[in-house]
Image (cartoon, rainbow, N blue to C red):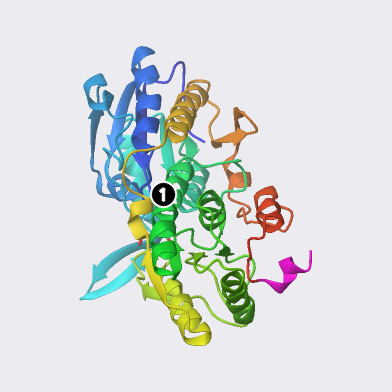
Amino acid sequence: MAQVKGKLKRIGILTGGGDCPGLNAVIRGVTKPALDNGLQVFGINDGFEGLVEGKGQQLYNKDVSGILSLGGTILGSSNKGDPFHWPEEIEGKIKIVDRGEKALKNYEAWGLDCLIAIGGDGTMHIANKLAKMGMNVVGVPKTIDNDLEATDQTFGHDSAVYVVSEALDRLHTTASAHHRVMVIEVMGRYAGWIALNGGMAGGADIILIPEFPFKWEAVYEKVISRNMLGKRFSLVCVSEGATAEGGELVIKAKDKKRTDPIQLGGIGEIVAKMIESQTGLETRYTVLGHTQRGGSPTPYDRILSTKFGVYAIDLAMKKKFGRMVALKGNEIKSVNIEEAIAKQKCVLKDTQTLQSALAIGVSFGSPELELE
Ligand code: F6P
């Protein structure tokens, strides 16, 4: 780790990976106290891509004023800029090369004492590698997926859940009017948090998540039994990473420029078609996609993001590098980045929200859970 003599003078900040609501609130939460404490803040553009390519500019109060409620990120982001998995065109072909040294050189050339990296697990993995090369880093966990074990919640998740919940409310009325089954596909990658929390908030009758592969028959039975009880419509909330028992992930595309080349998508359509063909019930599907990532953060996310940002700059000023801020209960604390990336947070059998959903009759289509 590079030694910083005396007080910190200049910090860099970047937002990496897929965007989510609350990124600007973190940037503001870091920058305002930093400037008040006499530090210079250098905003790096488009995540780690900007660190490798040398793109960035100094941030002033005017840059971070009025951005609390703004979605996206004023710095730009990218999920193709991993310095250690850098796609470069060599002799007409895309080759993956290591540009870690280049990232470090730019950090030094900009005169940075610390880098505040705001991102999900991919960003934290990169930050950890850069820390091992001598960079002083502090991480801030974002992702709508909420799949980082080290923090009770990532910012962005609540905003995504709000979008799912609102969409389900809207689908509810049209489903009921037309006596249809409505399937909604939500994001979350390999974790079911968005589907579970969004589905719970929006009153879904069936929630399908990656952690518990579902049985087709259980899904059909649930919609048929609702019909027989006089409930002539059903809401099915499917996580993009959900799979049927013995089935495979439904992949929309692959892009080797990304650290994780897999782009999920398509399970919602399959579930809708199967329900319609096997039960005879009219079914429609909606893919929420990036509406879950766009727009203004919820009040919860604005507050969490601001607290994360303020805590991150405090860690940096105290020279507590190699750490990631984290929500533990109601308090913001910090954990070692290495620890933070060791485990993905998944929905478990004893997750209280899942147990509550089961108690009110929600089906997960999983024999493992129905036996409880
Ligand atoms: O990790 C956040 C996320 O929105 C996932 O839920 C989703 O699978 C993925 O990113 C989509 O990535 P992209 O915007 O690159 O298609």
Is residue 150 toward the left or the right of residue 141 in the image? right
Element carrying mark 1: helix
Residue found at the far front of this picture: 230
Q: Give the total number of marks visible in the rendering.
A: 1
Q: Quadrant of residue 208?
A: bottom right
Q: Position of residue 218 (x, y in %)?
A: 64, 76
Q: In front: 92, or 212?
A: 212
Q: Quadrant of residue 105?
A: top left
Give the amino acid type for the residue marked by disc 1 in the picture: Glu
In the foreground, 219 or 24:
219
> Does residue 368 show up magenta in the picture?
yes
Name the spot of residue 259 as percent of width and height, x first. Answer: 42, 62
Near mark 1 (Cα within 10 A), the count class, few <14, some 14-19 or many ≥20, is some
Above or below 57: residue 37: above
- Residue located at (79% from left, 63% from top): 372
- Residue span colored magenta: 366-372
Residue at 37 percent of width and 66 percent of height: 286
Left or right of residue 105, residue 126 in this image: right
Residue that protrudes farthest toward the bottom in the picture: 277
Can residue 250 be seen here? The reply is no
Residue at mark 1: C-beta within 8 A of ligand 1? no
Quadrant of ligand 1 in image: bottom left
Verify whether residue 117 appears in magenta.
no
What residue is pinned by disc 1?
Answer: 166
Question: What residue do we see at 37% from left, 60% from top?
Answer: 288
Image spot of residue 228 (x, y percent): 60, 74
Would residue 276 be visible to someone looking at this image? yes
Of 315 and 240, which appears nearest the observer? 240
Front position in the image: 330 or 258: 330
Q: Position of residue 19 (x, y in %)?
A: 36, 48
Residue found 31% across the figure and 48% down from its top = 77
